[in-house]
Structure formats: C-alpha cells, structure tokens
C-alpha cells in the first residue's frame, strides 16, 4: 500500500511498512532534519527519505555527515553550512530555494538549531518567503529530560553556559529565579566546576548528569548539585557528552495563618487592603484571594 496522504512537505519514499518506493520530488523548502545523538539507528524513516531525495544536503561538518550518509547508502549533493559562514552560503541556499529546490540541513548530531547551526538560515529562509519543514528526531536535551526523573511539565533549555566563571555565575543568577526544570549542555573538563557554581547559585536542588545518551556507556547519575559536584571533583572529568538537568526550586512551605496575619497587619499600616494583599501574595506565596479576604477581615 502506498502512502496516499500527501501533506505539504511530506516525502514518502517508503510505504507504511518502510519499504522503499520511487521518491516523488520534494516540495521546495528547507528541511531541518534531526540525526542520531549516538545510536545510529535513532534516525527516522522520514529523515532517510528526505536526505535521499533533497536536491542538496547542507551539513555542519561534511566528514561527520558522510559517515552517517554512508551508513545508510545515501549519496546526496553535500556541502558545508555553518551560521558563522559568510552570507554567501545562505544566499546560495536562498537561490536554490527560489529555483524550486529542496534543501536539507543536518548538524553533527541531534536536531539542528539546538545549540547547533541553522537559526540564522531558518530565519533568512522564512524572511525570503520560503517554507521550513521540521523533520523531528533525536535531541540530547529531551533525551536527558525523559530519563532524568525530574519534573517534565515545565522546563527551560539554556544550552551551554558561558565558559568564563564570572559570566557563568551571572547566567546562573538569572536561572535561579525560574520555576522549571533546567536543561544545560556541558563538557567533561568543566563539569565539576560548573556543578559547584550551580550549587552555590541554585542551592540544594535535585539534579542529574546524563552522559553518553543512547551510546554504549550511557550513564545517568543522580544527586543534589552539591553531591554531584563533589563526585566529579574527586572522580575527575568524565569522558563523553553531557546534559545536566536540574530540578525546579523547592516549593516554599505554606505560610501559616499567624504569618499571614502578622504580615498583613504590618502592611495595612502602610497601604490599603488591595496593596497589602498583593504584597502578602508576592512575599509569602499565598493566593491573592486568601490574602485579600484576610486583609478585609483585619481592616474591619
Ligand atoms: N543539536 C544537538 C541536540 O539536538 O542535542 C546538540 C548539539 S551541541 C553542539 C552538543 C552537546 O549536546 C554536547 O556537548 C552535549 O552537551 C550534548 N549531547 C549531544 N549528544 C549527547 C549524548 N549522546 N549524551 C549526552 N549529551 C549529548
């Protein structure tokens, strides 16, 4: 059975069970294709179809790309793309799109644009009126999150922190305010120092160091930021690729009625019921409704 649903940008060189079919030409546009973060089998059938059918494939590093493409017997027209590249390559890609070509973008591993080249290109492509098609797949950030056991309902991906300590500490001070699981990329040599800075800036939070995900020596080490910092300080820099995941700030204990009354009584000497309630809600983390109702009672 052939795949008859022809959504825009959908390329199916395979039928529903994955057998190769002759590929129809791809719709013009930029195809942002995720590739594995370690295990070569973590590539989607659709990614292989697109890489096999695109008029050109641009890669962060053509030697790395060639290894992946060779593993799947693909021989596309391949060139290098990096956001730091001069504008000439971007213009070349825009010309190709204007001529109706399909262009695929891959990075060395995982999803392009995620701490990888591609953002400037995607923006330029959209500004020029062409389409950008996501071809989703592996990304170390999400792989680390789902293996971490930390809350996954709200998270913030912050990429690599600055390597200079003063800038890193300033970045951590901003992140300390965020009520979400934090996801960061880090390198082995900087890991112990970074974890120590995180512990100082963020306090006693649960954290996970996820290393070599999807690879032979995959490891997820859990602890507080302080215990993880101490571990890597004594064990030395680990080999391989690393994602750090940090749990959200612990919830403040609920304010007692006595705490709320004391706060509101003082606040009511400075302002009205509304202002006192707002101040109490912000400072004590109680609901505005509770603070307002009690402030009204105290004022009466
Ligand atoms: N675009 C990629 C993605 O979607 O995850 C990330 C590219 S970024 C240049 C590379 C960083 O991602 C590594 O230094 C490491 O922090 C993280 N990373 C990549 N592969 C990983 C893996 N298999 N296990 C843990 N972290 C990984």
Image: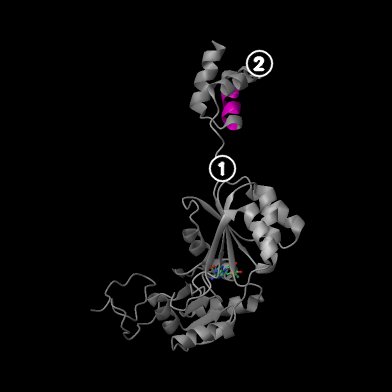
Question: In this rendering, which labeled residue sits more in front, label 1 or label 2?
Answer: 1
Is label 2 in a helix, a strand or a loop?
helix
Classify the position of the C terminus by image quarter.
Answer: top right
Q: Which residue is mark 2?
A: 269
Q: Which residues are magenta?
A: 274-282
Furthest residue to the top? 300
> Which quadrant of the picture is home to ligand 1?
bottom right
Q: Residue at x 52, y 16 (%)?
A: 296
Residue 32: give x, y in percent of width and height.
49, 72
Q: Is residue 9 left or right of residue 129?
A: left
Check disc 1: other Cα within 10 Å, few if <14, some if 14-19, many if 20+.
Answer: few
Please identify the quarter of the rendering in which residue 189 is found. bottom right
Q: Residue at x 28, y 78 (%)?
A: 17
Please identify the quarter of the rendering in which residue 54 is found. bottom left
Up the image or down, 288 lies above or below 50; here it is: above
Up the image or down, 61 lies above or below 276; here it is: below
Q: Is residue 274 visible?
A: no
């Amino acid at each position: 059975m052939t795949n008859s649903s022809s959504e825009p940008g959908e390329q199916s060189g395979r039928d529903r069970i994955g057998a190769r079919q002759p590929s129809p030409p791809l719709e013009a546009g930029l195809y942002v294709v995720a590739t594995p973060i370690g295990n070569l089998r973590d590539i989607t059938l659709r990614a292989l179809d697109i890489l096999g059918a695109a008029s050109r494939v641009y890669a962060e590093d053509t030697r790395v790309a060639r290894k992946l493409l060779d593993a799947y017997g693909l021989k596309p027209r391949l060139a290098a793309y990096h956001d730091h590249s001069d504008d000439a390559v971007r213009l070349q890609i825009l010309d190709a799109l204007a001529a109706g070509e399909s262009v695929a973008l891959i990075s060395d591993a995982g999803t392009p644009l995620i701490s990888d080249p591609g953002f400037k290109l995607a923006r330029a492509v959209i500004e020029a009126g062409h389409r950008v098609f996501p071809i989703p797949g592996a990304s170390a950030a999400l792989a680390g999150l789902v293996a971490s056991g930390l809350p996954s309902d709200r998270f913030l991906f912050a990429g690599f922190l600055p390597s200079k300590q003063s800038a890193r500490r300033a970045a951590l001070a901003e992140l300390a305010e965020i009520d979400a699981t934090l996801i960061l990329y880090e390198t082995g040599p900087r890991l112990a120092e970074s974890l120590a800075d995180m512990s100082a800036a963020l306090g006693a939070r649960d954290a996970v160091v996820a290393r070599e995900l999807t690879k032979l020596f995959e490891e997820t080490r859990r602890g507080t930021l302080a215990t993880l910092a101490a571990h890597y300080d004594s064990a030395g820099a680990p080999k391989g690729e690393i994602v750090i995941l940090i749990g959200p700030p612990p919830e403040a204990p609920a304010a007692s009625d006595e705490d709320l009354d004391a706060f509101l009584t003082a606040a009511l000497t400075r302002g009205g019921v509304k202002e006192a309630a707002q101040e109490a809600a912000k400072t004590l983390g109680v609901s505005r409704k509770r603070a307002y109702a009690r402030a009204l009672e105290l004022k009466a």
